[in-house]
Amino acid sequence: MIEEIFLRLLFGGAVGFAIGLTSIGGAVFMLPLLTLWLGFTSSEAVGTASLYSFAAKVFAGPRHIALNNVDFAVAKRFLIGAVPGNLVVTIAINRYMAVHEQNEQLTDAFQQQLRLSIIAVIFLAVILMTINLIRRSRRTQGEEPAPVQPGGGSLFASIVLSIVVGAVVGATAISAVVVVPLMILHFKLPARYTVGTTVFTTLVLMLLTSVVYLFGKQIDVRTALWMALGSVVGVYFGSRLTGRLPEQQLRIAVITLVALAAAMMLIFSGK
């Protein structure tokens, strides 16, 4: 029991340290750890990572609101589509697991498909993180983007894109790395509001996802909370190193590690 708690605190600390250093979301690190090293099924990993993400962000959301970093008009437009997209997918996954609970062959096949979906989204996250790294590099070289008006395109396009992103979050628990590009590229938010609005909206989505997976009995609550506790320490030390170490090299290293973890998940997906 003590060894299990220590291992989860250690894993949470490692995830938090990476978050503190790079500001990259925790689920892309959590999912490989939960599935490869702790032996969770794909649905249990998603549920547990969702609760971890909510617990890790629960204080950051109100903080960004207090600092006036949240664009509530954009948040409302995003959540109009993201909430139903999230709920449909999370309820469908948990309903399928409940209905076919006694059929091991069907549940194993479903878990395998969900695992492959998670791997695909992690690789997508790697691509998005790489694009973001390139954008940051260009800014440091003096290539500033032209100012744009926040708000995004048509309401229909916003809702469709938000439904897709909400569904992805519900199926994989990967949130910030798929929400941030939408906030930047579609809703045209500046950096300050991108971070605050992303934290607020993903907090809402993680709460919804966690509740559905909790009722579906697809969450290991103790693992999520122990890892969240460990991540508090990790974030503290990781954030203290920010600015002292070369950021670009750190981000490259983290992106490489995430890609390797996804590759390992893919290699061992059939075993």
Image (cartoon, rainbow, N blue to C red):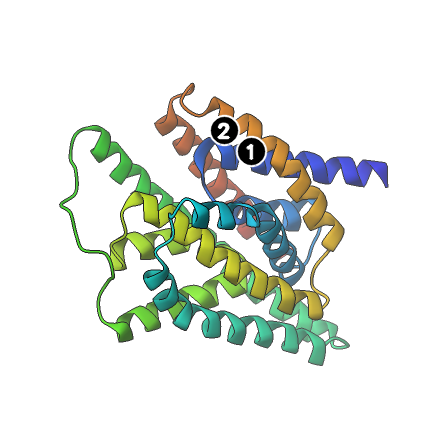
- Residue 123 visible in the picture: no
Q: Residue at x 26, y 32 (%)?
A: 137
Q: Return the residue at label 2.
A: 239
Q: Position of residue 139 (x, y in %)?
A: 22, 34
* Residue 26 in the image: above or below residue 44: above
Mark 2, Cα crowd under 10 Å, few <14 / some 14-19 / many 20+, is some
- Label at residue 235: 1
- Point out the residue furthest to the bottom here: 99
Q: Amino acid at mark 1?
A: Val
Q: Quadrant of residue 138?
A: top left
Q: Amino acid at mark 2?
A: Ser
Q: Position of residue 223 (x, y in %)?
A: 72, 48
CB under 8 Å between discs 2 and 1: yes
Q: Quadrant of residue 178?
A: bottom left
Q: Residue at x 44, y 50 (%)?
A: 65
Q: Position of residue 129 (x, y in %)?
A: 37, 44
Q: Residue at x 32, y 57 (%)?
A: 182
